[in-house]
Image: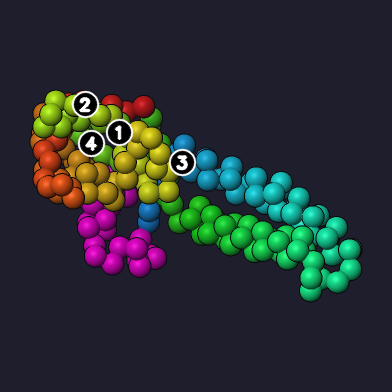
Amino acid sequence: MPWVTAVDTARKVASTPRFGQLECVKKYITLNGFERLREEFRRLLHEERPRVTHEVTVAAAHGDRSENYEYKLGKKKLREIDARLHRLQKQLESFEVVDPAKRPRTDRVFFGATVTIEDEDGEYTKYQIVGSEELGPGCISYEAPLGKALLGKREGDSVRVRRPAGEVEYTVVKVEWK
């Protein structure tokens, strides 16, 4: 799928009212975000789950399970781990991985770009445009209002975003690919 088509699709899908209910749609994630989720999956499957399984086995050996707090707690932890593993597996299978370092260099904001913006007060902020599963400091989802508004913009372009306190205008100062 050509990059422009993928970005157009992401923008269109992100603005769909029932976006969260669409399961057939690819969600985008950076290579770093994908590797973090894959590492979490590996850690849960090969370290955390075996440790908790052992704890449950030890607790079960203490006899009556109906009043065995450690056993019940361990079983609850196992259910939580299994649910997270299931969710991670589905996500890892459905993501479209984008490596920003391998994207063609452009002055436009696309998924994976790091963009510096200036607000109306002259404050500068730098964000990387990422998927919703990899949010953190310095990151903004391509599905968020500001992320959607920035997609496809060039250095010098302005966008207006509705915030709870009213509309705010931002100017794209710099687009980087790292």
Pair 3/1: label in front: 1
Pair 2/3: label in front: 2
Residue 149 coordinates in the image, percent (x, y): 18, 45
In the rendered structure, does residue 16 fall within the stretch colored magenta? yes
CA distance separating discs 3 and 1: 15 Å
| Magenta highlight range | 1-25
Pair 2/1: label in front: 2
65 is higher (above) or lower (below) than 3:
below
- Mark carried by residue 124: 2
Residue 34 coordinates in the image, percent (x, y): 48, 43
SS at mark 2? strand
In the rendered structure, does residue 144 fall within the stretch colored magenta? no
Residue 68 coordinates in the image, percent (x, y): 79, 66
CA distance separating discs 2 and 1: 10 Å
- Mark carried by residue 109: 4
Say which residue label 3 marks.
33
| Residue lying at 11% horizontally and 38% vertically, measured from the top left | 169
The C terminus, quarter of image? top left
| Residue lying at 67% horizontally and 51% vertically, measured from the top left | 45
Badge 3 amino acid? Gly
Badge 1 amino acid? Tyr
Badge 2 amino acid? Tyr
Say which residue label 1 marks.
127
Q: Main secondary structure of the magenta part?
A: helix
CA distance separating discs 3 and 4: 19 Å
Q: Earlier in the sequence, mark 4 or mark 1?
A: 4
SS at mark 1? strand
Q: Earlier in the sequence, mark 4 or mark 2?
A: 4
| Closer-to-camera residue (54/36) | 54
Q: Earlier in the sequence, mark 3 or mark 4?
A: 3
Residue 26 appears left or right of 61 = left
